[in-house]
Amino acid sequence: MTLKKLLLATTAIATLGALAAPAFAQTTIRLVSKDLLTTNPDDVKEIEAIEAALKAQGHDIDIQTIDLPGGTSAYVDALGVMLLSGDIPDIIYFQGGDQKMAEQGILEDLNPWIEKSEHIKAALWPHNVERLANYPYLLYVYPPRAPQPVMRKDWLDQLGLAAPTTVEEYEALFQAIHDADLDGDGTTGNTLGLTGFGNTTELDSVFNQAFGITGTWMKNADGAWVNARVTDAEKAKIEFYARLAEKGLYDKEYVTNTFDVKEDKFYTGKAGVIFGSSPEVIDIYAGKMRQAHPGEDIELALLPVPSGPGGQGLAAVDVSKESRGWAMSSLSEHKEEAFAVLDFMASKEGQDIDRMGFVDVHHTVGADGTVTFTDQISTWYARFFNAANWTPPTPLLSPTAQSALDTIKANFVADNAFVWPAEYAADVDAAEQVYRSWVARFITGEASLDQWDAFVSEYNAAGGQRMAEYAATVLGD
């Protein structure tokens, strides 16, 4: 018996026992999310604002939030235990672990609901539409994560260089940052061109297309599908990264850097360029940079997406499925009400609540209705959605961050990645580990690019070849 059948039987028994209970107009919806807790006063206040707005529209809904441990891994683990125990809330936020629940049949197909929605359908970003077509169980209404590089505008001005538009100009900029005394400490040659953390995903966001890496799967000279990570285009890109690191322009410590260490190197002038994962994060970087340098009116400059032999544009966006997002329980007895909550959060009123925070705290409203954001808005974050069709009453992003968002909108290209069947999970993980390990060794100089064929052989043996054979059945000719 599947988990869904077992839970349906349990629900039926509970329903029979409740038939004699008195009916109430108010409906209780249970919701679980990593970013909504009863212990956070702002979370509680937002839920109360949502309930009040829904009630004014004729939906008397009591939203009961369930507290689970914070932190991604702790939340994922605790959520999985809760769901497998049979405790299935009406609305569930996933940040991993959703696919096994979908396979058990306990997640609702959202497409029929979205098709007849009043607000969500119009609020979707292009990649949301494609991901829902491929995997209809998760909803994450945000622009795609597309890291983009920024640097201090005053440093760029001091260098007297135009913003780079090619790979060669980027290398020249990193070299100029390294060679100049931009921090005024009387020394040169000790500033990294750029820093990063964990892996090279941030850099790939803007350099993939320039090197001709157009998607996860590409055809080789024989016309066969292969993973882009074993192509000549990938080799040329990694060679570029390795050359930057060898010249002291790229942080060789990126593998061991945490995100806060990466940021600190930027704020303290040890690195000139940093990648912001979203427009909002770019504004956070600007605010923290000014905090680190009180009295200095520092602005950040967004650097353009470079062009190269392969073209120009941000990296292709994986549209196989959402990696995180909101789901509805297929077992819920209150699906209409649960979806009403999600649909409301995509409306203008819902977005005003979710994106602008509280009046007289995060923003003020003048006698003429003019909205002004306070400094506190920098600490606020949306708990639900970032709707594509919502416009703030006054600019919420700085011009630099808005430019980053405009770049994301203008550069969307769908990737050809797809959802792997469960039996390929070990292959995917093993091949990824081989790739990351070799890339780190190439960049730090522990391995030479002359060993590229050895990397390809190990990658294919770890699962890459089996994955490519399956990809051919999915992608066809």
Image: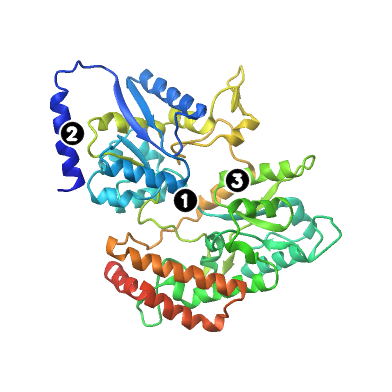
Could you tell which of marks 2 and 3 lies nearer the N-terminus?
A: 2
Report the front residue among 141 and 192. 192
Q: Position of residue 76 (x, y in %)?
A: 39, 46
Could you tell which of marks 2 and 1 lies nearer the N-terminus?
A: 2
Report the front residue among 430 and 85. 85
Residue named by callout 3: 401
Which residue is drawn at the image coordinates 59% and 35% (left, top)?
A: 379
Residue named by callout 2: 11
Report the front residue among 49 and 185. 185
Q: Amino acid at mark 3?
A: Ala
Q: Quadrant of residue 222?
A: bottom left
Q: Can residue 312 be seen from the camera position used here?
A: yes
Q: Amino acid at mark 2?
A: Thr
What is the CA distance from the residue labelled 2 to the residue labelled 1? 38 Å
Q: Quadrant of residue 413?
A: bottom left
Within-10-Å neighbours for mark 3: few <14, some 14–19, many 20+: many
Which residue is drawn at the image coordinates 57% and 62% (left, top)?
A: 203
Q: Position of residue 173 (x, y in %)?
A: 71, 64
